[in-house]
Image (tube, rainbow, N blue to C red):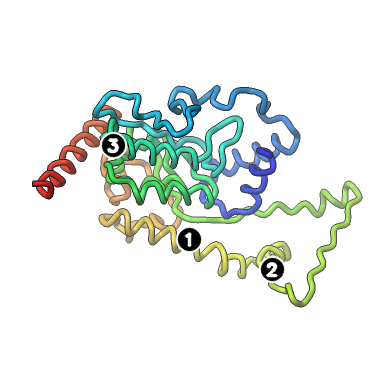
Amino acid sequence: MLRSLFLNELFNTTLTIRDTGTRMVENLLQMVMEGNIISAAQPANKHIAFFVPDLDEPGVNPYDKLEENSIAVIPLTGMMMKYGYWWRPGVDMLADLIRMADASERIVGTVLLTDTPGGTTSSVIQMEDAMRNRTKPCVGLIDGECCSGGVYVASFCDELYAMNRMCEVGSIGTYAQIIDTREADKKWGYRVEQIYPPESKYKNLPLREAMEGKPERLIREELSPYAIHFQNIIKANRPNLDASAEGILEGKVFYAYDAVENGLIDGIMNMQQVKDRVKALSDRQQLIYSQFNL
């Protein structure tokens, strides 16, 4: 089941991931197809127990067990995939963690700790919903890279910082990677014919044309619309963005110091400074609320 979900997501969604992440996708695909991925028999949280709270008690918010005025640190790391697999949590789980942290009276705000090249377009849906509907401050902190789908999500933070001036930020855009297996099929004696009735002449047409060296429809109907949507999200969430900076909305990756200069992020801070910002934003929010509760 997990294997089929993984393959379905990679083969059926547009990618918002930088080139370094693409190689990771290719390696994972090969490992999964060959059955060499981590055994599903291993504990699902073996490598993530450090940051994922205990979710084994249905109906219990794990953040309610923390001290008052706590700050939840939610990690958005590695390749972003919608569903959780046996070797890592899915982004949907992280979205639920944000919702639970936001609902807990013990939590004053969250830090979204990012180190990701991006991932699939389907992985951002629940995360965007959780970030849009939160009621408490969230400050993003980049510890390494925040690219493509990672920037998409992190742009919903109230403020966004990098831990080091050489952190990498950007790669705003989309692309599709088509794997042509026809030569391999011939090698193994397979001949695959796809037959479409006239009533279904547009079914899979963008992909079929792209496979014949005509990617215009795929670009026009699938890639460009999402790329424009992505650009609009960033422009709306980062109002001080210098959209005239070369390539900033067209896939270029920046070091953090240039990202600050161009308004893509807000500055350079370490974890303690970011936590202090969350607390300051929470205090300001409570002050505003108190004026309406007189």
Left or right for 220, reference 227? right
The residue lying furthest to the bottom in this view is: 198
Give the class, few, some or many, for how many residues have Cα within 10 Å of label 1's Cα (few <14, many ≥20): many
Three-letter amino acid code at disc 3? Gly
50 vs 188: above or below: above
Q: Any mark on residue 151, and which? A: none
Is residue 44 at least partly visible in the picture? yes
First of labels 1, 3 by sequence position = 3
Q: In 3D space, how far apart are the residues under numbered discs 2 and 1 (Cα atoms)?
A: 20 Å
Q: Which of 69 and 90 lies nearest the eye of the viewer?
A: 69
Labelled disc at residue 109: 3
Q: Residue 227, labelled with which disc? A: 1
Q: Give the residue at x 41% y 59%.
A: 231
Q: Secondary structure at mark 1?
A: helix
Which of label 2 and label 3 is nearer to you? 3
> Considering the numbered disc 3 on the image, is that residue within a helix, a strand or a loop?
strand
**Disc 2 packing (10 Å; few <14; some 14–19; many ≥20):** few
The residue sitting at 69% across, 65% down in the picture is 204
**Which residue matches tag 2?**
205
Whether pointer 2 and pointer 3 mark residues with C-beta atoms closer than 8 Å, the reply is: no
Circle 2 SS class = helix
Image quarter in which the N terminus is found = top right
How many residues crowd mark 3 within 10 Å: few (<14), some (14–19), many (20+)?
many
Image marks 1 and 3: residues in contact by CB distance under 8 Å: no
**Residue situated in front as seen by the camera: 160 or 102:** 102
